Image (cartoon, rainbow, N blue to C red):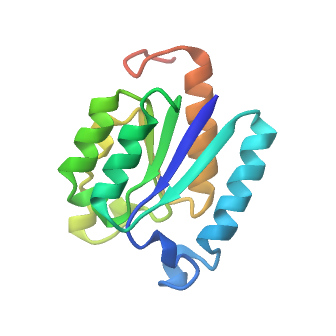
Amino acid sequence: MKILVINGVNMNMLGIREPEKYGHLTLKELEKNLYSYSFELGFDIETFQSNFEGEIVEKIHSAYGNADGIVINPGAYTHTSVAIRDAISGVGIPTVEIHITNIYAREGFRQNSLIAPVCVAQISGFGAESYKLGLKGLADFLRSGKNSDDEEL
């Protein structure tokens, strides 16, 4: 199983940008932790970061036939990108949207996600652990063979 982890705009500034909100962990350190975690769970990941919407769309397109799932932190594109939303919808790969902060406890404009409706789940507010929760949840979802419309009791 292979999961693509995509980080969007400004995520390359982790550890520098507003550490009181996003923590002191750098993107490189986060990715190293995620590679170790995925190894523990028995699957491969590929990581990608871009500040450019079109590059993110291209990466999602390239995942078609090459990845079983996607974990994405679109950053500010969460609230603005119909293109990223359409790319996720178009490839039909199960996707989990994640955020380090709780977007619903922030400014009003951050409380709307254009991406979440085309994802199997959204996780926010657990700091860097949001990534691990997203990876674990997506791996469990993929292994279960369920689709996003199946209900759990």
11 over 91 or under it: above or below: below
x, y percent for residue 103: 37, 62
Residue 93, can we see it?
yes
Q: Is residue 39 left or right of residue 148?
A: right
21 over 144 or under it: above or below: below
Frontmost residue, 9 versus 103: 9
x, y percent for residue 32: 72, 60
Q: Is residue 79 left or right of residue 123?
A: left
Quarter of the rendering containing residue 142:
top right
x, y percent for residue 145: 54, 14
Frontmost residue, 116 versus 33: 33
Q: Residue at x 53, y 28 (%)?
A: 68
x, y percent for residue 127: 57, 64
Quarter of the rendering containing residue 8:
bottom left
> Across the whole image, how many numbered discs are drawn on residues?
0
Frontmost residue, 81 versus 57: 57
Q: Residue at x 72, y 51 (%)?
A: 35
Image quarter in which the N terminus is found? top right
Residue 114, can we see it?
no
Q: Residue at x 27, y 65 (%)?
A: 110
Q: Residue furthest right?
A: 40
Quarter of the rendering containing residue 50:
bottom left
Q: Residue at x 50, y 15 (%)?
A: 146
